[in-house]
């Protein structure tokens, strides 16, 4: 039973396999947080502390641990909800109105009902408990049951209380080509705010929080939550004056206002959250398992070839056919034509919006290429950027009012393009029909959906930030329903659109335009904290790398890309014989190990070697992999002690190194470990092991 209720005390205890989360309703009707941490079974042990004011300057509402503080009263810390009612009152006062428990196959859900004391506004706090994943989803539902409009000016999906001070907060910083740069910061007095105001991409921060008490991969307490939403978000961490840390996550507050019309209701995005008493590894593995079981489409992702880095906008049917033939020879399974196949697209300034096949580049239509790709036995994919339009296009000439704009201002172009106003039903319908047409008229298996600029000149509504993303989700949902075999890749100038919202809508995710195999190790390492390896598209590209100018051996480039879903982005027509042979070998090996990479359990292996080894383990049933990287040998050429994780202590494992095989017990491999020594620069190896 994952939801336990003490009705006499109005205490609710949410139980997962290892953890507990408790809150209750006090005699004033306030919903008050009681506990989050390791499992406690005795619900009767939870008592509601009596509210006492410390001083008039420390009012009880300020000190009390509320589950969902609303704006109003003697509350000055962060609130989750601010509503302005039709008469201008902008304070909510709620009372408890009962609860409900729903049982589904994969979760139990508790709904706590609250209602305003005066206005007919209902507020429900929802908690979905995924017992065997040690995870929970929190979201709220607002229902306007009055005859008048209400305005929601702030909506965070939940507040969490961490019973410590001086925690470490971690998230990512970064920008285009440098996504997923992890940072860790001490929480002290004051607030830490992370947010996205750009509407579309989220290169800078990612919508999640991780708060830990000096945790490592395998030790220590970690509290975490990820917002199931793309686009604008805000998150606030606040160490209070009263010995705890608060954290909230929800819809971006920047320029936000949602109108709730009479009879309307609104569901906030959920926060997928959890607690780990055993470090970051448990956090990542629980999230990965959840994503694999509930969000990501089943099946293994194909090895793709994408022509972007090879051809840029200079696409031609003949060259694409040649690339497809070579991609097949190497072992690719999916051939993707990137930007440049449509309209008058010869650079960034034209074409977006004119989604007809460019006749100069494809004189006999795109089906000539598709037939060739299909006859080779490959899947076919195509690039689109549907939310955008370039000014010189036919689409813009016909519908200049379809872009976000203010009538009295000039809209900004960025990358030579405007953003279409996705809140307009006619724009949504146009995009749906365009993509449906593309998929119905041509034998296409894969869509790469890109979005390369942020929103500006937003127009008059202030809920566009929410509705824009809702429209993207909705179009993809509709397309998936009608074209169930088509895979959708989410891309936004590289890795600008990865979060727990899009994870359940799209199937494949572009991690970064930075394809330098060394930079990718850092990007991918951070990515793995939250996101599963099956959702991490990684390409092998040419050297010198266009961003870093670095030359890295092909084997290292392959190993780095084999950590996720493998893709090739090289100009393969220029491969030497030796490169062709190596690529064939590596792709064949990837196909062998792919189920372990994409569906196995993932471990970031820590070590103390003075050399900069990166070690990643994958384990599925009786098989396992260890990828080891050494970008640069340093003085002393120290070896690294590799201590594997997740093995059966008593079982014997055969471990296959490049230099030969050895056998050891699981206990030995985990406790004592084995020595691995790579030398030179850009050294890498893949070690496979299996339980005998
Ligand atoms: C973005 C993507 C790239 C590529 C280009 C095409 O930058 O991240 O992978 O598709 O657009 O213009």
Image (cartoon, helix red, strand yellow):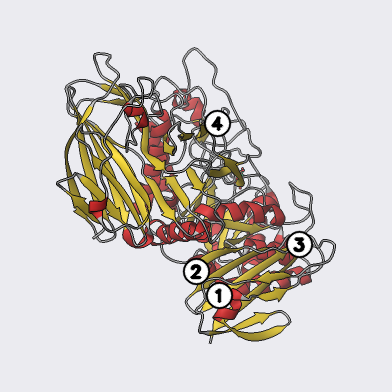
Tell me the residue that label 4 is attached to. Answer: 393
State the count of labels: 4
Locate residue 143, reporting x and y percent: 22, 32
Q: Is disc 1 surrounded by few (<14), some (14 to 19) or many (20+) residues within 10 Å? A: many
Q: Quadrant of residue 74?
A: top left
Question: Compared with residue 412, is residue 422 higher up or lower down, i.e. above or below?
Answer: below
- Residue 442 visible in this rendered orientation of the protein: yes
Discs 1/4, front: 1
Residue 600: which numbered mark, if any? 2
Tell me the residue that label 3 is attached to. Answer: 611
Locate residue 364, reporting x and y percent: 57, 52
Label 4 to label 3: alpha-carbon separation: 54 Å
Q: Earlier in the sequence, mark 2 or mark 4?
A: 4
Kindly state the secondary structure of the residue where label 1 is placed.
strand
Tell me the residue that label 1 is attached to. Answer: 624
Q: Is disc 3 surrounded by few (<14), some (14 to 19) or many (20+) residues within 10 Å? A: many
Q: Nearer the viewer, residue 606 or 87?
A: 606
> Cβ of disc 3 within 8 Å of ligand 1?
no
Locate residue 301, reporting x and y percent: 50, 63
Q: Nearer the viewer, residue 172 or 519?
A: 172
70 to the left or right of 229: left
Kindly state the secondary structure of the residue where label 2 is placed.
loop
């Amino acid at each position: 039973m994952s939801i336990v209720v003490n009705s006499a005390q109005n205490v609710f205890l949410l139980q997962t396999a290892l953890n507990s989360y408790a809150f209750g309703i006090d005699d004033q009707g306030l919903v008050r947080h009681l506990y989050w941490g390791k499992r406690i079974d005795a619900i009767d042990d939870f008592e509601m502390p009596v509210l006492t004011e410390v001083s008039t300057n420390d009012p009880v509402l300020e000190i009390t641990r509320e589950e969902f503080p609303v704006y109003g009263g003697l509350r000055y810390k962060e609130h989750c909800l601010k509503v302005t009612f039709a008469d201008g009152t902008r304070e909510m006062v709620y009372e408890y109105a009962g609860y409900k428990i729903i049982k589904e196959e994969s979760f139990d859900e508790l709904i706590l009902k609250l209602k305003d004391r005066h206005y007919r506004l209902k507020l429900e706090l929802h908690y979905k408990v995924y017992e065997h994943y040690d995870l929970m989803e929190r979201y709220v539902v607002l229902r306007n049951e009055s005859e008048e409009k209400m305005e929601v000016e702030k909506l965070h999906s939940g507040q969490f209380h961490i019973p410590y001070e001086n925690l470490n907060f971690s998230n990512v910083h970064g920008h285009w080509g440098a996504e997923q740069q992890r940072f860790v910061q001490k929480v002290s007095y004051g607030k830490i705010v992370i947010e996205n105001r750009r509407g579309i991409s989220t290169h800078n921060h990612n919508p999640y929080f991780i708060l830990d008490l000096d945790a490592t991969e395998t030790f220590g307490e970690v509290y975490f939550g990820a917002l199931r939403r793309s686009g604008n978000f805000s998150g606030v961490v606040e160490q209070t004056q009263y010995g705890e840390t608060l954290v909230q996550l929800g819809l971006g507050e920047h320029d936000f206002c949602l109108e709730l019309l009479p009879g309307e209701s609104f569901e906030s995005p959920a926060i997928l959250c959890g607690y780990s008493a055993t470090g970051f590894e448990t956090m990542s593995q629980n999230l990965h398992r959840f994503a694999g079981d509930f969000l990501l489409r089943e099946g293994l992702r194909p090895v793709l070839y994408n022509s972007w880095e090879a051809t840029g906008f200079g696409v031609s049917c003949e060259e694409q056919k040649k690339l497809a033939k070579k991609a097949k020879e190497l072992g690719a399974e999916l051939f993707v034509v990137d930007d440049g196949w449509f309209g008058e697209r010869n650079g960034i300034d034209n074409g977006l919006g004119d989604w007809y096949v460019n006749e100069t580049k494809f004189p006999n239509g795109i089906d000539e290429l598709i037939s060739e790709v299909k006859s080779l036995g490959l899947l076919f994919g195509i690039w689109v950027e549907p939310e955008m339009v370039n000014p010189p296009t036919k689409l813009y000439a016909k519908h200049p009012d379809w872009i976000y704009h203010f009538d009295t201002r000039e809209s900004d172009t960025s990358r030579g393009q405007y953003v279409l106003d996705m809140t307009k039903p006619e724009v949504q319908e146009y995009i749906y029909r365009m993509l449906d047409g593309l998929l119905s008229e041509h034998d296409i298996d894969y869509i790469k959906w890109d979005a390369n600029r942020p929103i500006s000149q937003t127009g008059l509504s202030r809920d566009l930030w929410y509705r824009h993303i809702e429209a993207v989700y909705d179009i993809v949902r509709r397309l998936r329903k009608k074209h169930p075999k088509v895979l959708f890749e989410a891309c936004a100038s590289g890795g600008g659109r990865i979060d727990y919202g899009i994870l359940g809508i799209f199937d494949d995710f572009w991690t970064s335009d930075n394809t330098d195999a060394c930079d990718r190790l850092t990007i991918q390492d951070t990515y793995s904290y939250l996101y599963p390896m099956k959702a991490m598209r990684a390409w092998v590209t040419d050297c010198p790398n266009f961003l870093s100018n670095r030359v890295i051996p092909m084997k290292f480039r392959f190993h780095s890309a084999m950590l996720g879903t493998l893709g090739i982005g090289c100009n393969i027509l220029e491969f030497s014989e030796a490169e062709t042979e190596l690529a064939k070998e590596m792709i064949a090996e990837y196909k062998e190990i792919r189920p372990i990479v994409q569906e196995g359990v993932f471990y970031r292996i820590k070590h103390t070697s003075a050399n900069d080894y990166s070690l990643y383990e994958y384990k599925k049933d009786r098989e396992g992999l260890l990828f080891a990287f050494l970008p640069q040998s340093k003085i002393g050429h120290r070896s690294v002690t590799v201590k594997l994780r997740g093995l059966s202590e008593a079982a014997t494992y055969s471990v296959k190194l490049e230099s030969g095989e050895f056998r050891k017990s699981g206990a030995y491999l985990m406790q004592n470990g084995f020595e691995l020594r790579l030398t030179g620069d850009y050294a890498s190896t893949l070690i496979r092991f299996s339980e005998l």
